[in-house]
Structure formats: structure tokens, C-alpha cells
Amino acid sequence: LEAGARLGYAASGVLHLVLAWLTLQLTFGGNGGQADQSGALRELALNPVGAVLLWVLLAGFVLLGLWQVTEVFARPAKQKLKPAAKAVVYVVLAVTTVSVLYGTSTNSNQQTANITATAMSYPAGIWAVGVVGIVVIGVGVFHVVKAVRKGFLKDLAERPPRWVVRIAQAGYVAKGVALGAVGALFVIAAITHDPKKAGGLDAGLRSLLAVPAGVVILAAVAVGLACYGVYSFAR
């Protein structure tokens, strides 16, 4: 099980490195692939050994998810939420990988907009979309705080070398900024009553180009995502 979890972290490293490359392409004005998890997996599928690599990543995500499930049972009641949430994340990654392997993956931005539109059609749905956006922004802020306070060290069995700490900090800040951008889109969608304003990670990253110095910020996020990928290997 421990070996499987290690494979899972390596799979996460590969995913973030490809995601960083797709994000960097956006800074140069290229359309490239979709800058999110499904886009990164589809990019890997284009590799001559892509299918084999995707099966390896699938195994890694499933085994790392299983590791998190064991953490749910092993930890005290107050500490069960975090591994449970991580288990869900890795299950979603595994499902996404399967959809890419069988060619059934869809555009996540359109899918998010459709789900948002459905949610808004219900009573108080607009408020629910706004709350989701605020929660996602909060998770983004949590990532940045975790980077500044080096809270990720609590997840490790031993203190890593200084260079690992530094790249981990850069990685968590980048993920925090990206999540903040995604959350902002949901809030804007709720305020404007326009579900098309909502989007996934790809839409969130592209939205950064509209802010002052957006190209620089997006380039920094791309570097940070690459740092998180390297940190995943070190972990």
C-alpha cells in the first residue's frame, strides 16, 4: 500500500508538470491544450507511449486514493475530513483518466457551465453557486497560508532539504492563486446570473490574463505548478 501511495505521488508529479507546460503555453498566446487535469491527461495520451503511461497514472491515483481511505480509518475523528477530501480528489482523477483512456472526456469549462446553469434553475441556486465560489476562494487562501506557514511539513514523516521546502512553498502558492481564480468565476457567475461566467481550472487560468500584469502572473503560476510537480516526486 505504501509503494502504491508513492506511485500515486509520482503520478501527481507528472500531472502537474504537464499542467504547468499547458499553462505556460497560455502565456505565449497559444491555444494549446486545455489547461486543467483532463487537458493534461489528454496531452499525455498524444505521447507514443501515452496509453501505457495513462494506465500507470491510473494505478497511482487509485492506490493513493486507497491510501487516503486507510488514513480516514486510522486517524482520530477530528482529523478524518482532510484524508476523506483527498480520497475524493484522487477518485475524480482516476475517473478522469479512465474517460481519457476511452475517449469519453469532455470540455470541463462547458461541463462546469452546464452544471452551474442547472444549479441556478433551482430556488436559491444562485446563492449556492456564490457560496461554492467563496468556498473555493477560501481553499485557495488556505493553500497560500499553508505555503507561508510551511504547514505542509506536518504532512511529512521527516523534514525535507531546504530546496524541497522552497519549491513546495512556490507550488502551494500557485495552486492557491489558481483556485482563487476559479472561485472568483463562480462568484461572478452568481452576481451576474450568468452560468457561462463559471468555469473550471482552464477558464480560471485564462481569466488571469485579463488582470494587470496577467501574463507575468500566469507565467509565475506555471512555474509554481511545475514546482509542485517536483515536490510531488520529492514527497
Image (cartoon, helix red, strand yellow):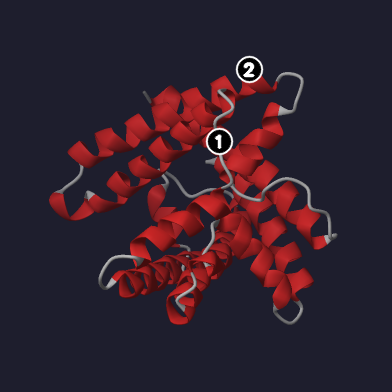
Tell me the residue at 44%/45% (across/down).
158
- Answer yes or no: is residue 137 visible: yes
Element carrying mark 1: loop
Tell me the residue at 34%/65% (across/down).
121
Residue at the extreme front: 121
| Earlier residue among tags 2 and 1 | 2
Amino acid type of the residue that numbered disc 1 sits on in the rendered structure: Ser
Crowding near pointer 2: few (<14 within 10 Å), some, many (20+)?
some
Location of residue 76 with respect to 130 vertically, above or below: above
Q: Is residue 138 left or right of residue 196?
A: left
Report, in whole angstroms, how far the alpha carbon at label 2 lies from the one at label 1.
18 Å
Location of residue 50 with respect to 117 vertically, above or below: above
Tell me the residue at 30%/52% (across/down).
82
Q: How far from the left and from the top, in percent, is residue 88?
A: 35, 42
Q: Depth-wise, is mark 2 or mark 1 nearer the camera?
A: 1
> Circle 2 is placed at which residue position?
52
Please tell me which residue lies in front, 40 or 65: 40
Q: Is residue 88 left or right of residue 215?
A: left
> Circle 1 is placed at which residue position?
105
Tell me where residue 2 sits by quadrant: top left
Please tell me which residue lies in front, 45 or 75: 45
Element carrying mark 2: helix
- Answer yes or no: is residue 170 visible: no
Contact between marks 2 and 1 (CB within 8 A): the answer is no
Location of residue 44 with respect to 175 vertically, above or below: above
Residue at the extreme left: 77
Crowding near pointer 1: few (<14 within 10 Å), some, many (20+)?
some
Quarter of the image with the N terminus is top left
Please tell me which residue lies in front, 73 or 152: 73
Q: How far from the left and from the top, in percent, is residue 49?
A: 72, 19
Please tell me which residue lies in front, 8 or 117: 117
Tell me where residue 84 sits by quadrant: top left
